Image (tube, grey):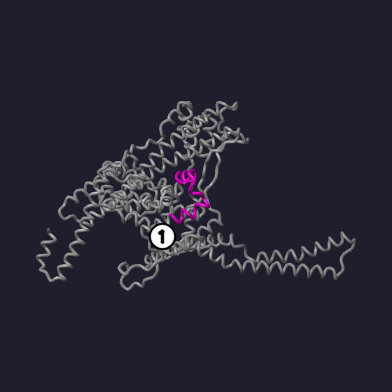
Amino acid sequence: MFLKSKFLKHNLNSKLTRSSSEIHLEREGRERIRRISNAVAGVAWRSTLLDMLWISGPVTFIGATVGYYLGYGHLPTIGTLIYFFFFGVITSLASVLANIFNNYRHAGQSRSNERNLSQVIDDIPELIMQTRNLSIAQLEGDAKRREAATALLRKNDLSPDSVKLTVKELMGDDESAEVLGDIENYRRIGLRTRIHDLVDEYSPHIDPQIDALKEVAPEASQLLRERFHGHVRNLDAGVPRNEDFIERIMAAIEQEDHLLMTLDDVQQMLTLLFELINGREIPLLVFQYIGRWRLAQAFDHLEASRARYRFRQATGISRLKALTVYLAEASDTLVESVPPGLKTEDMLARSREAMNDLAQRIETRCRERHPDRAALRADHDKLTNAIRLFRSMRDSFDLVERQHASLVRAQERWERISKETSEKTPQLRWGPGRRGLRISENTISLDNQAKVNVCAQLAPVIRKLYAYPSAESLMRDEVPHKRLILDVESAKNLAIEVAVVLDPYVHLSRPEVQRAINSSNAADFSAVEPGFSAATKAALGAAMSKEMVDDMSRSAHSLAVALVKHYQITLEPEAIDFLCDQYGADRQALEILGSNTSRAVARSLNAPSHTLPPIGSTPRPWYRALVQAKQVLEHKNRHHKHGDGHKHHTSSKKQPTHHNDQNISR
């Protein structure tokens, strides 16, 4: 009996602790939403009332008495004091009434702002989850199982049973699943010594399986290796972003082609929106030169050319990724999935192989006596879309070469003007002073007014996504009610709306902004789960955004490479110390970069920094397969229509059926 009461007491305490924690999150989240809304609509009128009464009462009396004495040499009469008193009271009441009326007029706007903020913060995490589900639903077989397990493995707070599930899905080994589940139990209580014992005992059995998984799922392989050694990623480090996702969405807007973006890009854009609304500030580093105007003009031209070149490079690679992802999402192709970190050459090879297989399959179907018209039309449409994406990628790769030539000319102009001017080559400056080459720091963020405006524009768009579910998706005796329903087309349209709404405030179309966002990690919102209220999601979103530690080392190293390679500026020891101390850059990498002469490093400019694989022209067998499929489909349609018309004619004349069959066969 004592044990039972103690157990009940423990459960009650744990429930109360969990409940109080959730209540605290609710309270903090609601306060955050209300604070943003009130900051725009105005302050409460009670504080203004007290201020007015204080100013019109004692302050006015003291001021009137002192002023009257200084002006007339004696104290004011009772009548004069009564005059000043009622003058202050009436003025204060008029001011208070005007303030109350103003706050009353803005009360509706404040409630509307709060409602829009609550809805966007409440629905965006749900939309992210639905987009992830749509992306995984388009995969098939082992690729679908691996991607689902990888999505689960990204969560830091997995239970031991969840870790076992992911290992079974990824490796299909019950023994390895039990081992990693035990390691997770020991990790939660800090028993590192038992983790080391299990790693030493089972490394010969588990390491080869993790290495084999790396070929098809590199991210899952890395996460499993970390779990096997008892490590999980820190929440403040965030998660890597999908590179160039903004560029693909902007290209889809410009060319009105949704195939140029992927569902992963939609998920990344919604995550960025949730970060910015919850107060995320993303650092932005750019060069700034102050000095002679000719040198400054050449510097600006070179920096613009370098930005355009990098943008064209990213465009070409993103077009290739869009093609590969399309083939992976299309059913029955050789591309099962596109794991993160896949090389450009591998993506191109897989895409070519899949398109060659599609063309051969179409030709084989066309040679059949009675081809499956539905399957033939589906393969024809898939190959048509793939060829359109392939040609878009090829055009982007051609633009990279032309932009590289423009970059070389801008760099030569910078060198020539640097030699002609009497001023020595500019150096990286820090500390006091104005002239020279400096690193300008800025942030990408939304202020309170921008958050309210963004949510006011997106809330009506999200409300249109609410609809009644189909009867097949309802459980027995379930009362239907409106819920968020997302499909592929509406998800991509939503990403476009988000990009269009955010662009005036954070300038997503600028290359330097896209580079800064790509080089930063996204906040980890895996702790946000379905069923949480808007206040809880706001509190968790704000906490995750504030806890993010921005790693600026990659941006600093990129700027250092640009200094040496494009501007031919030698990295002095003081400049290396500044980049390492200020931005956490890798000292060893900067010292290697600084030890080479700027002229020697600059010679590599004549070749692109990231060599893109050769594309060539579109293979003719692809077009030949499309022509054959079109001929077969049109011939079948004409044959079908002719047969129907002839049957109708013979039936009207009461002719025998066998005679009609002979005419059709003939």
Q: Residue furthest front?
A: 653
Q: Quadrant of the C terminus?
A: bottom left
Residue drawn 75% across and 65% down? 56
Q: Which residues are magenta?
A: 496-520
- Taking depth in this image into account, of 10 and 162 the one nearest to the observer is 162
Find disc 1 in the rendering and name its residue. Answer: 126
* Left or right for 41, reference 330: right
Magenta span main SS: helix
Say if 345 sits above or below 523 in the image: above
- Where residue 500 appears, as percent x and y from the top left, is 47, 54
Which residue reaches farthest right? 73
Q: In this view of the protein, can residue 202 be seen by the observer?
A: no
Name the foreground residue: 259 vs 81.
Answer: 259
Measured as percent of width and height from the top left, residue 314 is found at: 41, 42
Q: Secondary structure at mark 1?
A: helix
Asked if 93 appears above or below 635 in the picture, the reply is below
- Give the percent coordinates (x, y) of residue 402: 42, 36
Residue 471, can we see it?
Answer: yes
Residue nearest the viewer, comparing 638 with 421: 638
Count of marks placed on residues: 1
Q: Within the magenta stretch, is there residue 497?
A: yes
Quadrant of the image containing the N terminus: bottom left
Between 90 and 239, the one lying in front of the other is 90
Amino acid found under the numbered disc labelled 1 = Glu
Q: Position of residue 482 (x, y in %)?
A: 40, 68
Within-10-Å neighbours for mark 1: few <14, some 14–19, many 20+: some
Magenta-drawn stretch contains 134: no
Quadrant of the rendered image containing residue 474: bottom left
